[in-house]
Amino acid sequence: MEIKRFGNPSGKKIMLLHGNLMCWRQFEDVIPMLEEKFDVYAVSFDGFDGTGKTTYTTAQEQADKLEDYLIRKCNGTLDLLLAESLGCGPAVYLKASKNIQIRKIKV
């Protein structure tokens, strides 16, 4: 899994989860519009991270990795989680987590 961070570290935290057969670059036209005001985290799931060394197994496994990352890097909170297609499965697991607080989710 690869997570790219862009933007304003003091801004509201937004995480972008890509669709099937995509990677974080799915959002590269949107990120410049967000990064001045927001702290943006763009995710490439295992199997889509360009390394050729990972495999996407389950939405739950991806959500577990994201949960760990969010606890370590974002104090377990997000202001917005945006997910498309393949990203919707991990998004639902994250929203259901008792360890993560997501203020808004858009799937």
Image (cartoon, rainbow, N blue to C red):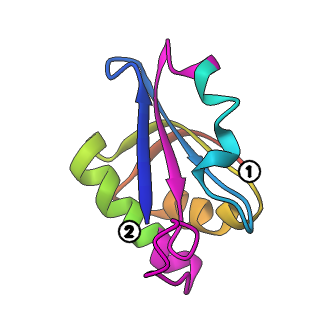
Name the quarter where the N terminus is drawn. Answer: bottom left
Query: Please, what secondary structure does the residue beneath circle 2 have?
Result: helix
> Picture coordinates of residue 3 (x, y %)?
42, 52
Residue in the image at 43% along x and 45% along y: 4
Q: Residue furthest top?
A: 36
Q: Which residue is mark 2?
A: 65
Q: Which residues are magenta?
A: 33-62
Residue 102 in view of the camera: yes
Tell me which numbered mark, 1 or 2, is placed earlier along the sequence.
2
Residue drawn at x 38%, y 68% as measured from the top left:
65
Would you say residue 98 is visible in this rendering? Answer: no
Residue 3 among those drawn in magenta: no
- Give the number of marks: 2
Residue that label 1 marks = 107
Left or right position of 94 against 85: left
* Along the line of sight, the residue nearer the viewer: 44 or 9: 44
Secondary structure found at label 1: loop
Crowd tier of the residue under label 2, counting other residues whose Cα lies within 10 Å: few below 14, some 14–19, many 20 or above? some
Is residue 38 depicted above or below 41 in this figure? above
In the image, residue 13 sits, relative to residue 21, either above or below, namely above
Tell me the residue at 27%/52% (across/down): 71
Locate residue 13, reporting x and y percent.
44, 31
**In which quadrant of the rendered view does residue 12 lie?**
top left
Q: Which mark is residue 28?
A: none
User: What residue is rendered at 74% in x and 54% in y?
Assistant: 84
Determine whether, in the image, residue 88 is placed left or right of residue 35: right
